[in-house]
Image (cartoon, rainbow, N blue to C red):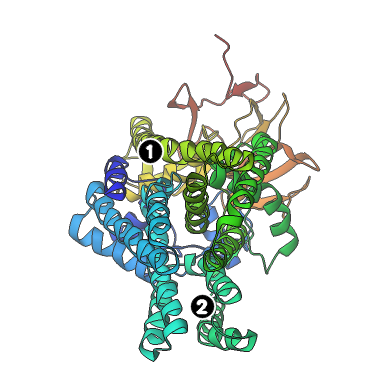
Amino acid sequence: MFAVALGALALRSGFMPDDFIWLGVWDNIPPPAPLGNTPLDVYRTATGIPEHTLHLAQVGVFPWWVEPTVRVAFFRPLGSLLYGLDHVLYNRVAVAYQFHSLLWYVGLVVLAGVLLKRVLPTAVAGVAMFLFAIWGSHAAVLGWLSYRSVVMSLLFGILGIFLHVKWREEKRTSTLMGALVSFALALLCGETMVILSPYVLAYEAFSGPGQAKDKLKGLIPFGVLMALYFAAYRAMGYGAGGSDMYLDALGTPVAWFQAMLGRVPAAIAGLTLNAPPDFIFDQSLVPLFTLLGAVGFTLFALLVWGVWPRLESAERRTVGWMLTGAFVATWMSNSAFAGSRTLIVPSLGMAVGLAVVLRHAWKGRAKTLRAGAVLAGAAVMAFIHVVGSPYLWWQTMEQYSQADALMGRVQARYEEAFDQTKLPNQRVVVLNAPNGIIGIYGSVRWWSSGQPLPKAWWVLSYSLYEQKVTRTGPNSVELELTKGGHFLDSVEERIHRAARHPVHKGDEFDMKGMMVRIEEADAEGPTRISYTFDVPLEDPSLKLVQWQNKKVVPWVPPAVGGPSSSLNVRVVQ
């Protein structure tokens, strides 16, 4: 009931920016250059093949600074298939897609309840299921249609864990086969099953029947399945690399570990205090969320310690494997950039831990000073998660709805700025994007809507800093940051080029009609960049525009040697 009530808020969230990639693919709209995405492989966005990547950059699908080997390719065939089924049935009626996702979420909560009832006392299982159903961070997954594959994978994965536990404790071969089929389906839905796998290992370590050798034997079927999956995954070219948004712990372990030092504490703050880790997109907030993570971890650890003497041995083992699985999953899930959407797998174990704390804090209330302190702390946690979570659901869906409306306004601004009869013979040059999301997805939304395409759509800068634009020649222009800051230093800019692939003074990027050169740079990034075109700036084949006061307006180049102008000027009221 609670899952339905809160999940229904997602029905108004609409399409998110990357949904328009899948919609365009399923509509068979001709792209400006061959995409990596196909109808049954819509999550293969960047292939890691330099020639393919550079071709997409030359027409503006990727930004000019893209790392040629960037790979963002995820194996989610069942997720792709069901997205296509929605498209066949509902075309672009977003509420129907969202209702489909809601059904999966309700099913996930029900199966989580089945597993919890198997491994916990009934009362504790009921509380844990309730907490899992309303967990505030789940809204970020349910409301974003592209993340339905996460819910699907987790659903089948939890079913697999339930059957694995049943097989190990009842020795029925049929349940082993059911577990393996469930795990396989989870892997076909997405990588979320990999993030869930620590729960399987932790179950065997804490609660698996028999001696150590029996526990290891119990893991052999699961281990073989996962080994086959990883071998096939790599062989088919899936994975992530070259990006700061998605990190590969095996391919770049040092960069991964360094990123985790900021991401994991923020995730722990989200799990314990309901503080949305999405805020660390603003890198200046990382220290604050590191502190919040430490506070939340300490508070939760003290509460578990406070009720530990009251737990029966079986309950201790269950709490042990659930919290261990959650902790390891927190590290694994944050290989994708920290955000509320990364918390759904560890929230399963956290719901168990919190349910145990609440149940036993109440049962042992007022018997000792320690019990009173535990009850007070548990009351704080209950307020944060029971009262705070519905607000997070509402707030998240409000933000998603606004994001959908924003992309609609972006589309309208470009429609106002372009003469669509001339556009097929022009190359669009957007000097500045108001933010990285519009920089990345503005042209995607245009293409997905079936509008006439220009020969190229180049966005020169995503930077939010004030920039000076200077014409330096008949066919050249420079952007310079004169009041601090660096180009290519934001999270959005580093989606396509990780910080470990820096650009240097003198580096050039040939976009086949636009040559980009780094004119000034230091250890933190470039500060002055030149752009040289193959025709004069006044040539009608170039459509030069800028974002100004939330509108797309023409940028009229001054005479050579004329005065510079400014972009992104902040007006103090």
| Residue 356 relative to residue 500: left or right | left
User: Does the rendering let one see residue 453?
Assistant: no
Residue 223: x percent and y percent? 55, 83
Do the numbered discs 2 and 1 sit on residues whose CB atoms are within 8 Å? no
Mark 1: which secondary structure?
A: helix
Q: Quadrant of residue 366?
A: top right
- What label does residue 24 carry, if any? none
Q: Quadrant of residue 147?
A: bottom left
Position above or below: 231 against 351? below
Residue under the point 47% across and 36% down: 383
Residue type, numbered disc 1: Pro
Mark 2: which secondary structure?
A: loop
Position above or below: 565 against 63? above
Alpha carbons under labels 2 and 1: distance apart: 41 Å
The mark nearer the N terminus, 2 or 1, is: 2
Residue under the point 56% across and 77% down: 204
Residue ranking furthest to the front: 367
Residue ranking furthest to the top: 573
| Number of other residues with Cα within 10 Å of mark 1, as a class: few under 14, some 14 to 19, many 20 or more | some
- Quadrant location, the C terminus: top right
Q: Which residue is mark 2?
A: 236
**Closer-to-camera residue (130/462):** 130
| Residue 369 relative to residue 134: left or right | right
Residue type, numbered disc 2: Met
**Closer-to-camera residue (468/107):** 107
Q: Which residue is mark 1?
A: 390
Front position among marks 2 and 1 = 1
Position above or below: 195 against 469? below
**Closer-to-camera residue (523/460):** 523
